[in-house]
Amino acid sequence: MIKISDRLRTVADMCRQGNVAADIGTDHGYLPIYLVQNNIFNKAVAMDLREGPLEKARKHISGYGLQDRICTRLSDGLESLKCGEADTITICGMGGRLIRDILINGMDKLTPSVQLIVSPQSEVGEFRHFLLENGFDICAERMVKDEGKFYFIMDCRISSEDDNNCYSDEAEYQFGKCLLEMKDITLYEYLQRELSVNQAIMSDLEKKDESPALTRRRETLEAEKSCIETALTYYD
């Protein structure tokens, strides 16, 4: 059996059991191998934009004897996926803006019945804004700390109703309404770290000569601090 990171295992745990999974940006193909080996899915499609990673995925898939259950495709995002082909689509290890672009360009491949598991590594708050403003529901979130790094993982799908999730403040967009409401302990650790980093940077800026750029930077840090402190009130 293949061994995968805590991050990928969390992604796999969030997947609902189905027939076909599609992993976008599959890299070495570890996630689809795990999903099929553990009978979470009968089959999988491992997709990547580059031939190099896809060839590595093919070797790993073949090494585990799963070439009859996992196919590989060279694909720019969802381009090579057929509409209705996958029950669950996973997109992990990319920036939020790139995942956003992949979804925008592949909207014709998404329906309310398709589960979407995404893990943006940057622009996370901006990505949540995109989802909620473009007809997606964020059904659940998990946060995991893996080798010292924190990862947000979201279970999403296109909303089948006129009204989707309602977020009440920017802290819920930045750190996840689901995680805050459940008082997620890993998120709490992350918030404490972010507050400490913010305060350290602010202290360092106090030693520098004033300038327009410094003023703008201080205003940004103050807004970030306020958002973190709002998030921490959920744990009171």
Image (cartoon, rainbow, N blue to C red):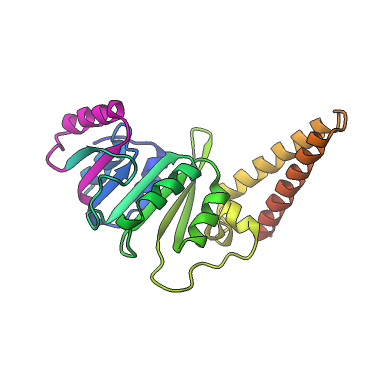
Report the residue at 45% width, 42% height from top: 98
Q: Nearer the viewer, residue 32 or 4?
A: 32
The quadrant of the image that shows the C terminus is: bottom right
Q: Position of residue 69 (x, y in %)?
A: 15, 43
Relative vertical location of residue 144 with respect to residue 229 in this rendering, above or below: above
Is 212 part of what is drawn in magenta? no
Report the residue at 25% width, 44% height from top: 80
**Which residue is farthest bottom?**
162
The quadrant of the image that shows the N terminus is: top left
Quarter of the image holding residue 17? bottom left
Relative vertical location of residue 114 with respect to residue 148 in this rendering, above or below: below
Report the residue at 32% width, 37% height from top: 26
Side of 185 relative to 83 (left or right): right
Is 62 part of what is drawn in magenta? yes
Side of 16 relative to 147 (left or right): left
Side of 115 relative to 215 (left or right): left
Report the residue at 41% width, 58% height from top: 156
Side of 60 relative to 225 (left or right): left
Q: Position of residue 154 (x, y in %)?
A: 45, 53
Residue numbers of the magenta segment: 40-69
Q: Nearer the viewer, residue 155 or 130?
A: 130
Q: Position of residue 148 (x, y in %)?
A: 53, 34
